[in-house]
Image (cartoon, rainbow, N blue to C red):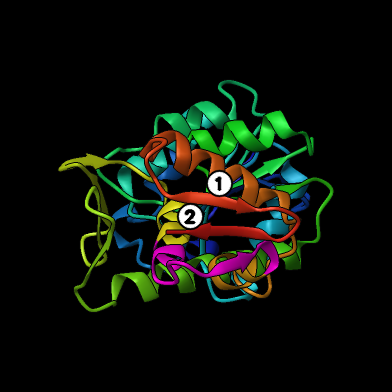
Amino acid sequence: MSATCDMTDSKMGICTNRTPDGTREIPHETSLRCHDMSMADAQTIVVVEHDPNIADLLDTYLRSAGFRVILASTGEQGLKIINQTSPALVVVATALPDIDGFEVCRRLPPSRVIPVLFLTSRDGEVDRTLGVELGADDYVTKPFSPREIVARAKAMLRRGHASATADADIITIGDDFRIDLAGREVHVKGEAVALTTREFDLLVHMASNQGTALARRALLDSVWGGDWYGDEGTVDVHIRQLRSKLGEELPLAPVWGFGYRLG
C-alpha cells in the first residue's frame, strides 16, 4: 500500500506519510524535504518513536497543546532531524528498530543543551540510571497517559526558559566548585564539568539552599516541577550522577529517611 505526503500538516511543523485510508501517519526520509526544517523554534519537539500508534497519539496531544512536532520512526532519522533543527525538547523511545534511544542520546550534538525525555517499557534501575548517565533529563514508563507527556514537556520547557532568562550570577560551593548561572557551566578546581540540564538545575537548587536539608519530594517539586508524575527514586539517581561527575569532595550528604543536604 503506497503512502502520500500530506502537506496540510506542514504548517504545524510536521510532514507525514498517510496511507490511503488515512489511519496512520509515519514519517519517511523524503518528509524531511517537505517543509523548511530551519523554521523550528523554541516550541518544537522531536519525537523518535517507531510504534505508529504511540507516535500518532503523542503527535495529536502535543500539537493540541500548541507545540510543533516532528516525528521520526528510527534513531538515525531522529538524529538527522535533530541535527538539522533546533528542537527545544527530544522525546525518544529506548526501543527503536535500528539504534536504541540510549545511542540516540549519546550521539546528540555536544554543542547544544537539549532536554531529553525517555519513553521506556521497563521501570528498572538499570534503564533509569543508564538514561541519566547518557544525558536524559526525565523518563516515562510505558504504558503512559499522553497528558502526562504533555505536562512533563511543558514543565521541562518552562524550566529551560527560566534558566535561559536568568540574570548573570555565580554560586560557589566551598573553594573548589563554581556555578555560572548565565552560562550554565560548572567548574571544579577550574576545570569545566559537563552536566545534563536536570543535573545542573538540581545542583543550582541545592547550592542556592546550602546547609538546608531538602526532602526528596521538595526537590522533585522545585526541580522537576509540581506536575511531575514520577517517583522519588529519580532524585537518588541524579544525586549519584552529580557525585560521580563532580567528585567525592562535593559536600553532598544524605539525610537518612528524608533527602539530601549540600554544604
Extreme-right residue of the structure: 143
Label 1: state its secondary structure: helix
Q: In this view, does 127 lie above or below 99?
A: below
Residue 213 included in the magenta stretch of the image: yes
As drawn, which residue projects farthest toward the left? Answer: 190
Which range of residues does the magenta coloring cover? Answer: 204-217
Q: Quick check: 36 above or below 50?
A: below
Left or right of 16, for residue 198: left
Residue 40 % position (x, y): 35, 61
Quadrant of the image occupied by residue 79? top left
Circle 1: residue type: His
Q: Which residue is drawn at 74% across and 53% down?
A: 22
Question: 215 left or right of 74?
Answer: right
SS at mark 2? Answer: helix
Q: Quick check: 263 left or right of 212?
A: left
For disc 1, the marked residue is: 238
Q: Where residue 119 sits in the image (x, y, percent)?
A: 68, 44
Q: Nearer the viewer, residue 41 or 29?
A: 41
Quarter that holds the N terminus: top right
Residue at x-position 55% and y-position 30%: 102
Residue count near mark 1 (Cα–Cα under 10 Å), binned few <14, some 14–19, many ≥20: many
Q: Image quadrant for the C terminus?
A: bottom left
Residue that badge 2 annotates: 198
Question: Residue 130 location in percent, x, y?
Answer: 59, 31
Residue 193 seen in the current view? yes
Q: Quadrant of residue 32?
A: top left
